[in-house]
Image (spheres, grey):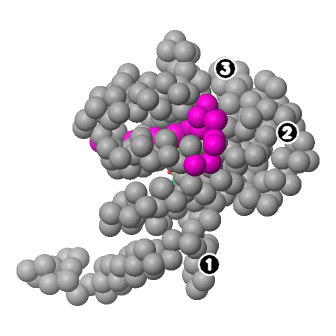
Amino acid sequence: DDIDVCGAWHVFSPGAHMRHLNDYRLTSDLREHLEELDLAFQPQFDLVSGQAVGVEVLVRWDHPELGTIGPGRFIPLAEQYGLIGTVGARVMDAALKATRDLVTPDGKPLSVAINVSAQEFRDPGFPERVSQALALHDFAPERLELEITESSRVPDLDRVVERLTGLIDRGVRLAIDDFGTGFASLLYVRDLRACRLKVDQQFVRSLDHDARDRAIVSHAISLADSLGMEVLAEGVETVEQERLLVEMGCHLVQGFRYARPKRLPELKQWLGNKPCI
Ligand code: C2E
Ligand code: CA
Ligand code: CA
Ligand code: CA
């Protein structure tokens, strides 16, 4: 990029050109083949009871030529090109349908956490779409949790929250995803009426050898405690991370240490085998 004459390098840079082309191609593929989206479900556990309490829904794209594409690749494109509402509605519908009759291994209602991007969440039509999906699938609202990621700023948060009051009053729960990264974490904590904080895996990864990570996680836990919120740590991979989390008072966990994301048939089989950790 040091030969940037009048910006010409940018225009003809083969790398940028290819990426642009690929993004464009991928987005139009997605628009035309939403039926290729499928869901994975990752169990969430309560360490006190040792039981699975819920699942997080993670979208996958089974592309016929490129294989499985992860959401990290196509969700940003869907957001950028105005497809996120359609993708989100599809995920919600498929997730409620798939999990409606599932119970935890000890026979309690299985809670289902669905990721909602900030853009979708701000759409005035969003609460009504959630309501309709709940009604369509006769899905108990208190089983549904919406995980809000703060990758972009939500300038009109109080208005957004106000529109969600109906859903919250009926028992739908909100979780703050990736807590501690992105925008306005503390504004979210203050204004969102969320009942759960999800501590981002970036803080969990080096927990056993980084005192700063420990301080941050421990502060997130006491903040949540003093506000009567639950804390769930994500990306837990080792016994040492688990030990430290328990010591700090975090009892809800999710991560490869316990269970990887599973497609529906595998999830059903797994739940049926009454796993316990
Ligand atoms: P996230 O919500 O933070 O989801 C957790 C991600 O960490 C998932 O990646 C999961 O597979 C991965 N993970 C879980 N346990 C572990 C672990 O122990 N170690 C490591 N290294 N990773 C672990 P995935 O499925 O690729 O999803 C990436 C992101 O895409 C999600 O991050 C979420 O922000 C977004 N996403 C996924 N599904 C949806 C969706 O339906 N709608 C929207 N808007 N975003 C979605
Ligand atoms: Ca999430
Ligand atoms: Ca997360
Ligand atoms: Ca994340």
Where residue 136 appears, as percent x and y from the top left, is: 58, 49
Residue range highlighted in magenta: 136-153
Up the image or down, 270 lies above or below 231; here it is below
* Residue 185 as seen in the image, left or right of residue 62: left
Tell me the amino acid under the disc marked 2: Pro
Residue 218 quadrant: top right
Question: Which residue is outermost to the top?
Answer: 226
**Mark found first going from the N terminus, 3 or 1:** 1
Residue for point 49% across, 18% down: 223
Q: Are marks 2 and 3 in contact (CB under 8 Å)?
A: no
Tell me the amino acid under the disc marked 1: Gly
Badge nearest the viewer, 2 or 3? 2
CA separation in Å, label 2 and label 3: 24 Å
Up the image or down, 129 lies above or below 14; here it is above
Where residue 276 appears, as percent x and y from the top left, is: 87, 37
Residue for point 48% across, 56% down: 89
Helix, strand, or loop for circle 3?
loop
Query: In the rendered image, which residue does mark 1 sit on?
Result: 67
Helix, strand, or loop for circle 2?
loop
CA separation in Å, label 2 and label 1: 32 Å
Tell me the amino acid under the disc marked 3: Gly
Helix, strand, or loop for circle 1?
strand
Q: Residues within 10 Å of mark 1 (few under 14, many from 20)?
A: few
Query: In the rendered image, which residue does mark 3 sit on?
Result: 249
* Residue 269 as seen in the image, left or right of residue 173: right
Quadrant of image for the N terminus: bottom left
Query: In the rendered image, which residue does mark 2 sit on?
Result: 105
Tell whether position 147 is magenta.
yes
